[in-house]
Image (cartoon, rainbow, N blue to C red):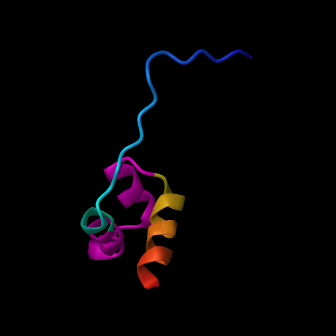
Amino acid sequence: MRVEILGQERRRRWRDEEKREIVMSVGVSGAAVTEVAHRHHVTRQQIYTWRSELKK
């Protein structure tokens, strides 16, 4: 299998405030991590990582 990348890969930079809002939205009205991740176009693991960083 061959993969061709078209265009430039870009990483999104998240402000601490945005990360906090996304992490805090988990559980609101029963929202699961998967739903929140999908809504904000991030991975579930990213939310778990941010949650861990915010605890520190």
Compared with residue 10, is residue 7 higher up or lower down, i.e. above or below? above
The residue under the point 54% across, 60% down is 45
Picture quadrant where residue 34 is located: bottom left
Residue 11: % across, % down: 42, 41
Question: Overall secondary structure of the magenta stretch?
Answer: helix
Residue extent of the magenta highlight: 20-42
| Residue 41 located left or right of residue 4 | left
Magenta-colored stretch includes residue 46: no
Name the residue nearer the viewer: 35 or 21: 21
Residue 19's place in the image compared with 9, above or below, is: below
Residue 3, image quadrant = top right
Q: Does the segment drawn in magenta span residue 40? A: yes
Q: Residue furthest bottom?
A: 56
Count every numbered label the image shows and give the total: 0
Give whichever of 55, 37 is nearer the camera.
55
Give x and y (percent) for residue 8: 44, 23
**Is 36 placed left or right of 55 in the picture?**
left
Residue at image coords 31%, 65%? 22
Residue 22 versus residue 37 in the image, above or below: below
Residue 1, position as x, y percentages in the image: 74, 17
Query: Who's the residue at 48% across and 53% down the image?
Result: 43
